[in-house]
Image (spheres, rainbow, N blue to C red):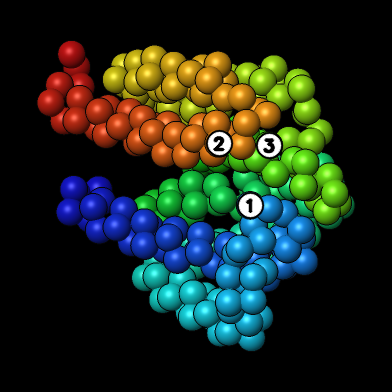
Amino acid sequence: MPFGEMAAMTALFGTGAIIMRGAGCTINDMWDVDFDKKVERTKTRPIASGIISRQKAMVFLGAQLAGGLAVLLQMNPYTILFCFGSMPLVIVYPFMKRITYWPQLVLGLAFNWGALAGWSAVAGGIDWAVALPLYAAGVSWTLVYDTVYGHQDKRDDVIAGVKSTSLLFGDKTKAVLSGFSASTIGLLCLSGYMNSQGLPFYLTVVGAGSAHLVWQLKSVDINSPSTCWKIFKSNTWFGAIIFGAIMADLAYNHLVPADE
């Protein structure tokens, strides 16, 4: 794909991701309004605090979904149909924390749908040998950062009746997340191998990516909400590392002839 087309597609997906991420947050806040009122950190959210009514939130959600649809309609027909498959996951995620200690798994399945949709948008279909490990890596990564995120509210969650992997893993969180972190790196490498990525990709993912996840797990204090928030936010850097790995490999392939 020419660089100009790739940049345009990246911008389009970035816009769609922001819009639909916002829609997911709106749905979550509408579902969780009663829970949010019982949790110190979330009781000031617009709907829970009464600043915005549920009716106005519904109108706002409609606008967000319309914006997301406008972006989606720029894609090929296969991608349009495929993306609709993520909506049930987006809608049911807030309900999962009421019935299972694994809502973060459902969140990961919803959040990382874009990895599959992105491949479809570019190729007109999905190479599952490449895209499925990438998707699974994203789900595994989501379990890492959202479990850390959930530890901020675990005391209030117990009182409110909210379930999470944070409560499920408890004091074993770091050990369990070490496994998910290793899975994230391993699955990224598997996806890269299936896509014939070059040395810069692996050096960056295994080197910088692994180092960052190790730093997260060594630094986080699961009993300190402020530390959990800091480590949760630091995952933007992990995402940047993976993006950098892809771009470094792309640049390398353009600069170095294939037979060298």
- Local packing at callout 3 (Cα closer than 10 Å; few below 14, some 14-19, many 20+) is many
Q: Nearer the viewer, mark 3 or mark 1?
A: 1
- Local packing at callout 1 (Cα closer than 10 Å; few below 14, some 14-19, many 20+) is few
Q: Residue at x 38, y 58 (%)?
A: 13
Secondary structure of the residue carrying tag 2 is: helix
The x and y percentages for residue 194 are 46, 28
Frontmost residue, 20 versus 159: 159
Q: For the residue marked with disc 3, what is the amino acid?
A: His
- Quarter-of-image position of residue 212: top left
Q: Residue at x 26, y 51 (%)?
A: 6
Could you tell me if the residues under marks 2 and 1 are in contact, i.e. CB atoms within 8 Å? no
Q: Nearer the viewer, mark 2 or mark 3?
A: 2
Q: Quadrant of the C terminus?
A: top left
- Quarter-of-image position of residue 171: top right
Q: Is residue 53 left or right of residue 18?
A: right
Q: For the residue marked with disc 1, what is the amino acid?
A: Arg
| Mark closer to the chain start, 2 or 3 | 3
126 relative to 215, above or below: below
Frontmost residue, 148 versus 178: 148
| Mark closer to the chain start, 2 or 1 | 1
Q: Quote the CA–CA distance across marks 3 and 1.
A: 12 Å
| Picture disc at residue 41 | 1
